[in-house]
Every structure is written in C-alpha cells, then in structure tokens.
Amino acid sequence: MAEKNKRNIGPLLIILAGCFWGSMGIFVRRLGTYGFTSAQIVCIRVTLAALFFSILLLIKDRSGFRIALHDLHLFLALGFGSILFFTVCYFTAITMMPLSTAAILLYTSPIWIMLMSVLFFREKLNGKKLLALALAFAGCVLVSGISGEGITLTGLLVGLGSGIGYGLYSILGTVALRKYSPYKVTAYAFLFAAAGSWLVCGPADMTAKFGAAPDLLPLLLFCGLTALVTAVVPFLAYTLGLRTVEASRAGILATVEPMVATLVGILVFSEPLTPVSGIGIVLILSAVILLNIRAKNKQAE
C-alpha cells in the first residue's frame, strides 16, 4: 500500500515542482529592480538554496554529508553540468534572442530526457508517451509565442545547451537516487552549483548592490523566499518524484512550468491571454492527463 501511494504521489510532486518553477518570474523581476544581473540572481538563488538543503540534510539524513569518494563525480555533474550549466546557458540565451525563443529551446529538455532515458535506462517508447511529448512541446511553443527573429547559430547552440543541461538533472538525479537520499542529492547538487556561481556572478559588484540597498533586511528576507519558492521546494519535490516516476515522463509533466508562468503573467503582471496561448495551455494539460491515464491503466493491469 505504501509503495502504491508513492507511485500515486510521484506525478503530483513533479507537477508541483513545475508550478513553483513557473512562479520564478515574480522573484526575478523583483530582484532585477535592485540592479542585480541574471548571473547574480542565479548566485543568490542557488547559494541560499544550498544552505537550506544542507540544513534539511542534517535534519533528515543521519548519514549527513558522507558519500563514497567514487560518487563525487556524479554530484559534480549534477551541480556544474546540470543546475549551473543550464541556468547560465538559459540566461545567456535570453540576452541573445527573444525570450520566447530561449524558453522553447529550454523546453526541448523532455526530448533530450526521453532520448537519454532510452539510451541509458533502456526505457521503452510507446505511442502514448510520444503523443504526450508532442502535445507538451507544441503547447510550450504556443504558450511562449516563438519568434524566429534574432536567432544565430551561437544562440541556437547555447539555447539547446540549456535544454540538455536541464534534462541532465532527471538523468543524473535518477542515478544518484539509487544510492542516496533525495536530501543528499539536492544538497550536494546545490553546494557545487553555488560554488560555481560565485565564479561568474561578480561578487564585489553583487556585494556593493546589497550594501547600497535602502531596505537591506526586507531584501535579504525576499532573497530567502526566492530560494525557497523557486529552488528548494521545486527541486526537492522533483527529486522526490523521480524516485517513482520515469525520467522521460517526469520531463513531460514538468512542462506545466511555462503554462504556470503564463498564468502568473496574466494574474500578477496583467499580461493578456491570447487565443494561441490558451490553446497551448490546453495542449500541455492534455499531455499531463494523457500520461496519468496511461499510468492508471498500467497499474490496473
């Protein structure tokens, strides 16, 4: 019964993660008003998240920070190769092309996850999974309103890099969870990502911006809230979900993020909902429903 409950809650945890990630625009825009660059916002987010995850690890996992030395490369890959790499690529792509195009290239991640899952985990492809992937990707395209303007080969490669790096978290996380707790996986991933972020954020400039803030305490509290809402809760939920959800399926379920981001834009920033975006939202929801129908049928057999 307990195992069945874990299977049932896994998809909900993945969807919950996507919903929290979808709220990121609220926090990024607010921190941007203080003059922080994208790299500095990333640094603030992952550094504070690393602190939260470390505290949570010490509370939840009796083995603490102990890992096998030969597994160190796995956590390095999670921190540098996935979290830090995809974030830097994504924010770089944003500066090189329209935001909608960068978002679409990021959300090629379910395609990469599915290909890597077949290659490394020998997951089977079927018609329903491929249909859900097509619906989810088409929905992301419509929701983001892709534009073909301003795309260069370099920008295209950087954008695709963000999608690959994003997808790697599902693959590497699945491998790490075979041996370590979700708390240890997330703590180490963010500790390494945080260490790397300080190399690219311009620490002196970032520190000066904190010093110049007229409301330092509220700013620090908001930074902590940013880490909790956009990193700690969603990454922990996603990692917990990966224990029972196939990596390829998890990647598709997480495409609720751009849908939620669009709804946040409408409700918080009074952005208009276009008919095309509405169709995109319906397609993403259709993909999520299709995958869950598939899961229930499989359990019933």
Image: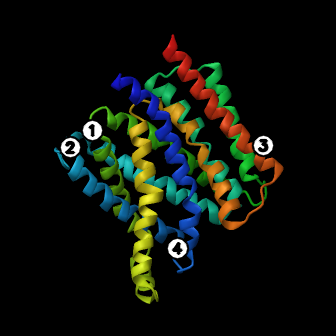
Instruction: Specify the amino acid type for callout 4.
Output: Leu
Q: Residues within 10 Å of mark 1 (few under 14, many from 20)?
A: some
User: CA separation, marks 2 and 4?
Assistant: 35 Å
Residue toward you, 226 or 113: 226
Residue toward you, 215 or 64: 215
Q: Split into 4 quadrants, where in the image is the N terminus?
A: top left
Q: Residues within 10 Å of mark 4 (few under 14, many from 20)?
A: many
Residue of label 2? 67
Instruction: Specify the amino acid type for callout 2.
Output: Ile
279 lies above or below 21: above
Residue of label 1? 180
Residue of label 4? 31
Q: Residue at x 39, y 35 (%)?
A: 174
Callout in the foreground (3, 2): 3
Mark with earlier residue (2, 4): 4
Q: Quick check: 92 left or right of 136?
A: left
Residue of label 3? 279
Q: Secondary structure at mark 2?
A: loop
Mark with earlier residue (1, 3): 1
Q: Secondary structure at mark 4?
A: helix
Q: Marks 4 and 3: CB-CB under 8 Å?
A: no
User: CA separation, marks 3 and 2?
Assistant: 47 Å
Q: Residue at x 65, y 48 (%)?
A: 259
User: CA separation, marks 1 and 3?
Assistant: 41 Å
